[in-house]
Amino acid sequence: MGKDVWVVAEHFQGKLNDITLELAAKGRELAQTLGGQLAVILLGSEVKGLLGELACDVVYLADRAEFREFTPEAYSVALQAALKDAEPRLVLMGSTSVGLDLLSLLSARTGKPCLDNCIKLEASDGRLFATSQIYGGKLFAEVAVPDATTLIAVVPGSFPKPENVAAGRPEVRDIPLPAAMPEIRTRFRKLIEPPPGDVDITQASVLVAVGRGIQNADNLAMAEELAEAMGGAVCASRPVIDQGWLPLTRQVGKSGMTVKPKLYLALGISGAPEHWEGMKNSELIVAVNTDPRAPIFAGAHYGAVVDALDLIPLLTEEVRRANMKKAG
Amino acid sequence: MIPGPPKMAMTAEWAILWALFLAASGLFAWRVTYLIRLLRLGRPEMRWDRIPERIQKVLVYVFGQRRMLDEPLVGIPHLFIFYGFIVFVMATSGMLLQGLLPGLPIPKLEENRFFAPIIDIFAAVVLMALAVTSFRRFILRPEGLQQTWDAMLVNALIAALMVTYLGASSFHIVASPAESKIWTPFAWGLADWFGRSETLRAHAAATHHAFWWAHISIVLFFLAYLPYSKHLHLLASPFSVFFSQLDPPGRLAAPPAESARLGAERLEEFTWRQLLSAFACAECGRCERACPSHTSGEPCSPRQLVHNLKVQLLQYGPALLEKARATADGGEPALIGGLIAPNELWACTTCLSCAEHCPVLNEHMSIMVDLRRRLVERGELDERLQEAFTNLQRYGNSFGQSERKRAVWTQGLGFKPKDARKDSVEWLWFMGEYACYHPALQETTRTLARILQAAEVDYGILYESERNTGNDARRAGEEGLFELLREKNTATLQKAKFNNIFTTDPHVYNTLKNEYPELNHGRHPVHHYTELLADLLERGRLKIANPLHSRVTYHDPCYLGRYNGVYDAPRKVLKAVGVELIEMPRSRRDSFCCGGGGGRVWMEEIGEAKSRPSENRVREAAALAGVEMLVVACPKDYVMFTDALKTTGLEGRLVVRDLTDLVAEAVAAEEIAAPETRAA
Amino acid sequence: MNIAVLTKQVPDLVEGVEIDASGKAVDSDSIRYILSESDDHALEVALLLKERAQARVEVFSLETGEVRDSLYAALAKGADRVVIVATGAKTPPSNHTAAKIFAAVLRDLSFDLILTGVRAIDDLDGSLGGLLAGYLNLPYVGLVRKVETADGTSMAVVQKEYPGGYAAELEVKLPAVLGIQAAEQPPRYVPVSRLRQVMKTAKVEEKEAAPAEAETMEVARMFKPEEGAGAAMLSGTPEEVARKMADLFAERRLVR
């Protein structure tokens, strides 16, 4: 039985994604417990520059033009090749647009079991336990990881991102790709950028976040006023963006931005995992929702069960008053 | 009338008269026949039943001019013009016949002692009436009143008719004073005045002749022109009234069984009565003035709706008539997306103010609902409305909450209401989803439950088996959903044991009373809770211990008042609890809708509203001096007005209270208080 | 072009969800089922392609849950054929098992596109679409928000969603499997009257399939998140809450 922990790296525009660093840190911890090595699988084109950021023992590398952009097909061929004669205990990847595709393709092609939505991974008594969240975070499932190579997709932000990564000097091994690569039937054409936004919410220190509870576009003006009074910006959860009330660049969550403001004021947001993922590392999270059982209260620092529409103008008043006192 | 035609027999004049007469009546007959053929493009509808009731309606609304008298400034003059028209029709017909067939013994009304003065006085009165209406039309310019050349021409023609009549009759007197023995004050007065002139005296006979011809020509021109102008309402409105809906307005017509697609958007999919609305409409604009959505600046206009139907009919009807003969495609474009934008249809709150104020009894609502049915059938609805429909279908309520939670409001009550599914009860309380699920209303629901318990009313509820009754789903155009909900509710009702039904929600009240056949016809009378409370107070089963002394105003809910005529019961309750009721300017049948009906609570805002209907209404209430409270008897009103107080900043000025809470306060408090607040 | 849409029923969370006596699974007695939301979007994508490119749409679903309701709705929306794949299972199987069953059913049928929702709320072992593509050795792209096909070419152009508003435009050679995140427009509405009409006249086919065994991990236990732990709650009227919050912000020097 293998003892190694592998991490599939994700990178974008020359930088490693946070999930990779989070998984590498966790992977190092697990590898130590298991008594094995930490390896990172790095696929891309001209990515050797990233090697220095990886504090791992081994890097399995495929640095070729055909891997410049991610396609599920090409990357899964490479990963399959890497796994062909190796038997790591765990292959970790992000539960992301990249990782989820790879997880499923790989599991079917290699016959190895897989698990998604993992938020916790612990070793105890020589056994590995993974905990995944389902039903929008309403339930958790604890799974005993079998004694064979297992593929696990981890929810970004589940493990802490290390502050300073000691530059490593990993051993680089080229992935043994087949001489005659199978036909790759998926081809990257172009990257679609988000429309230029007026505000970069990832830079704001105060975010006033609105969710379904805002009810209609007219009430956004209220939220803008509050944000202005507080020196922050307005952002939103997916349902608000889907309605077209705010542009994509204001979306916080799994498929939107990840933010870490000093204050995240969640108004009328229930706190579904997809949204939580995008803001859970905010310094101070204050949530307002009429439903006392909204999941967001579980993770927020402070909460109040009132109607956001009632609260917003009152809070704006109070904040303005406090501002004037400070100024005067 | 104009005494005696000039002697014409067998002259060129007589021939011209005949020619004009034949031309005018020919044109008239041809046009009217054509319009009737256009009406027959519509699909059949049975409106020939209960003839005595229909005749009565004609007497009240056409001859009694009841709706016109809502606005006395125009109603009274119009009454005179109306009767003046009848009088003149009788007299002119006689006169024409005399001219066409001289020598025939046709009664000469103008020589009748009683009739001659009447005609004379009416001529003057009609002129005065026209002066008033012209003042209103051109100076006051009420909104919605269409200023068209057509309207002006019609006014001018009527005035000209009166003037030429007076001219002819006065000059006849001047010419042959001996023949004028009957008292015709205005003609006499004018004759006096004209008679002072030598010249006029000398040419009196010729002038009389000229005026006579002018009068006849104008009459014949008017006859031919009438079916082309908006004055067509003259001919069409007695029919639109005769064929108007006798069923309660709260009962919408079910779609025809054999229809391939629900709803209507082309001429042949409407009924002939709906098409008749187009011809009966006088373009007076009353419906538009009464419409809460229009008043709020939304794109909805009942007048425009009927007008567009008329345009469609006149523009594309002819091709369809051809099709009937040549079996070729009429090529008619759909109304929706053509003359009518979907927004105009979704903006309607179904408050019925338009139909209630229409003098010719047009049924704007039925046209609007048929168009909405087609939009739903095409799947063209906004997302929130879609969500509401999906929730109604799946969970039986629009909130998207489980049906198992329908009775959660009973927690904190202190007792469990009887289950009408198992135990026999006198009264079934059909709750309605707002009373059960809406957090702002649940306490009021509990209060009512306690009041009834204290009054020892034997009532029960349906717990989780109750579903939304479908009133608003139906009016939002989802007919299939309405039928589904009605089926489910009917199955539950059939198994439950009760005698009477009451509800707090006027929407529920309306549809249970009018659209659930098993409950109709008095088998299980449906009441509104205000009627029940009024009754309990009257019989002394509820005693007022602390009369309230506030000054309040009351909002008549659309579905309780306009739709079902319940205005007095809530007022009796208010009187009993001791408050001083100050009526708003728009009360009873003029009540101004809160804007939540017809599925509007489930939709996004429509267009750029100046201010929502609910805001308009609370401002009206706040304008009443000393009034502290706006009393409501409908859960949607409560929610809409509470919101409106916030958005208008009037929260300090006024509170919204349900009638239930007032009664609770006024009745001996001990019995009504929640268990935990009662003295130990 | 022939399109297959795979749909599944998931627990309807409106009732909340409970754990059964074994502590390892969801209590199936208390569950109501509803069509998985992203599968509804997958169907919408298929129907849009049908409208634009004259495709034929067939919907397949395993037998658990209120599957007939959603299949009738699919027919009412315009699907050409709907099929229940019956293996005799009482509870919804894992995605691996489901993928194997569908792979066996679809292997010999000539579909150009197989669409399914990219994730369902009860997914634990990967995405059905990706697994199916793996078993059938077909190309796969997940988290797709737009699909276009050009007449004549056996190619689809898809947009794959990435965080932060980014997306990748990819070209996929057909036949292929796509995991749909969202359709270009919300799933269309079916008026109840049409649905009821379809229920009276149309047919839901049933196709028997052999149950499949697949490598899945066993759940050791299921549990609910801790209640109560979490936010310090600020109580009172909105006015009081506003005051408390403003004080809190001032304390933390958060207000500018």
Image (spheres, coloured by chain):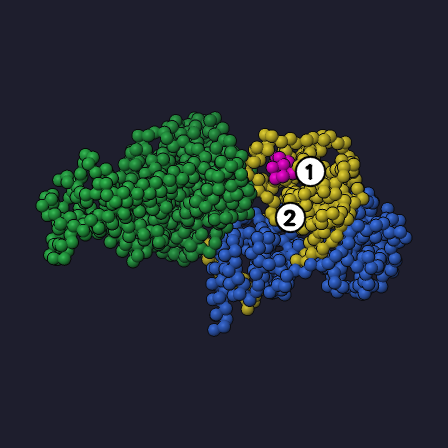
Q: Residue at x 9, y 45 (%)?
A: B178
User: Where in the figure is residue B502, as x and y percent of width and height?
Assistant: 39, 34
Over which residues does the magenta segment extend? C69-79
Give x and y (percent) for residue A217.
52, 56
Dot 1 falls on which chain?
C
Q: Nearer the viewer, residue B637 or A319?
A: B637
Chain C rendering hue = yellow
User: Is residue B157 in sight in this rendering?
Assistant: yes
Q: Name the residue that disc number 2 marks.
A: C183
Residue B140: horizontal and vertical position, in percent? 30, 57
**Secondary structure of the residue carrying numbered label 1:** strand
Q: Main secondary structure of the magenta part?
A: helix
| Subunit that carries the residue with mark 2 | C
Q: Amino acid at mark 1?
A: Glu
Residue at left offset 59%, top offset 33% = C198
- Which residue carries the number 1 mark? C58
What's the colour of chain B in the image?
green
Q: Which chain is blue?
A: A
Report the mark closest to the observer, 2 or 1: 1
